[in-house]
Image (spheres, rainbow, N blue to C red):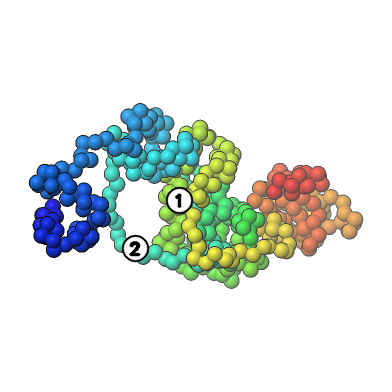
Amino acid sequence: MLKFDNVHERYQDGKLDCEGAAELLGVNVRTFLRWRDKYDVTKCSAWSDGRVGRRASNRASDSEVERITKLYKEKYQGFNVKHFHSYLCWEEGFSLSYSWVKRTLATAGLVLPGKQGGEHRLRRPRRPKSGMMIHQDASTHNWFGEENCDLVVTLDDATSEITSAFFCPQEGTLSSLRGIRETIETKGLFCSFYTDRGSHYFTTPEAGGKVDKANPTEVGRALKQLGINHIAAYSPQARGRSERMFGTMQGRLPNELKTKEVTTIETANDYLRNTYLTRHNKEFMCKAEDENTAYIPYIGQPLKDILCIKSERKVGKDNTVSYNTIILQIPKSEHRHHFVDAVVTVNHYPDDRMALFYGHLCLASYEADGKIMTQKQEDKIMKTA
């Protein structure tokens, strides 16, 4: 206002016109004219802001404040503010801003302000195209119910899109192969696969040492067969993108599953696949630097017969083989009188079904308990796969 007094005096003396005065004050001409008229009436530039004490026209009603605080206390206790706000937008059709929700909950004493700052770190650049690098990792946590289980997640490095996610009792070879297969079936064949050095991913002769790529695991064998480069991470920081994603999901999923009263792994997987992943990807996916994708359609041997555990067995005199204490009976074949002493391959699939192969010839498919499957059962599984 001291500046206005000086400019107004020069305006009165004819040294400035309206446009020049407005430019010096950094306002438009209409604002200067309003200030000039007000000054002529009050003979003073120290007038008060007319907005002070007035209720904002877009202010939320008291009933809305009460509704939000009540929802948080009674239904969504434990949600962080960001999750609470985004969940309300999806589930309740909420339209007010995240900042308003945060202030409202803080004023009510329901949340505390977060700590500022943290150690300085450098972000590893993302791959420029989707499909150039795929991460896979698992997190053991009390996601629902009373016992811990593992959440296996596969995501794209370029976009942070989760291409596969599911709960299982414990991660291992079969869960890893399942994540790879679901990604290829939905997106296509990718370039490289980035994981930790768990025993189902790599053979590591010395604890904490280099991996032995000359002695691949079943996951390594399958990736090599598909032409996918397998990259080992040598520190937790190298898997920072996956670790941050699990931090987000651990803060959100258990609360949502509790709200939905989910207690079994089957219903948890249904909710994850049909509800949560769509919302998560929409909120956290980012745009790749290059719009072209590195995914390519897969053409070749059925994926299920590559992404499985393969074990060689010698056929006994009763035309059976033993696999994991289960006896698999080989049925009569039009190709040979018997398979005694022949070497066959057992394919163990992620859903615990099995199949016996003599070279490329499939001798029989089996359920998890070792019973031979009929052709109708196989056709039904193929339709639902």
Task: Tell me: residue 34, above or below residue 307.
Answer: above
Residue sitting at 71 percent across and 43 percent down? 369
Residue type indicated by callout 2 = Arg
Q: Is residue 240 left or right of residue 191?
A: left
Quarter of the rendering containing residue 367: top right
**Residue 251: x, y in percent?**
42, 44
Whether residue 106 appears in this view of the structure is: yes
- Gap between marks 2 and 1 measured at Cα: 19 Å
Task: Tell me: residue 85, above or below residue 164.
Answer: above
**Residue 89: x, y in percent?**
45, 40
Residue 375's tag is none
Residue sitting at 13 percent across and 44 percent down? 41
Mark 2 vs mark 1: which is more N-terminal? 2
Residue tagged 1: 246
Whether residue 373 appears in this view of the structure is: no
Q: Is residue 330 left or right of residue 287?
A: right
Q: How many marks?
A: 2
**Residue 254: x, y in percent?**
46, 40
Residue tagged 2: 121
Q: Secondary structure at mark 1?
A: helix
Q: Nearer the viewer, residue 231 or 113?
A: 113
Residue sitting at 28 percent across and 44 percent down? 113
Q: Nearer the viewer, residue 186 or 230?
A: 186
**Residue 316: x, y in percent?**
79, 55
Residue type indicated by callout 1 = Phe
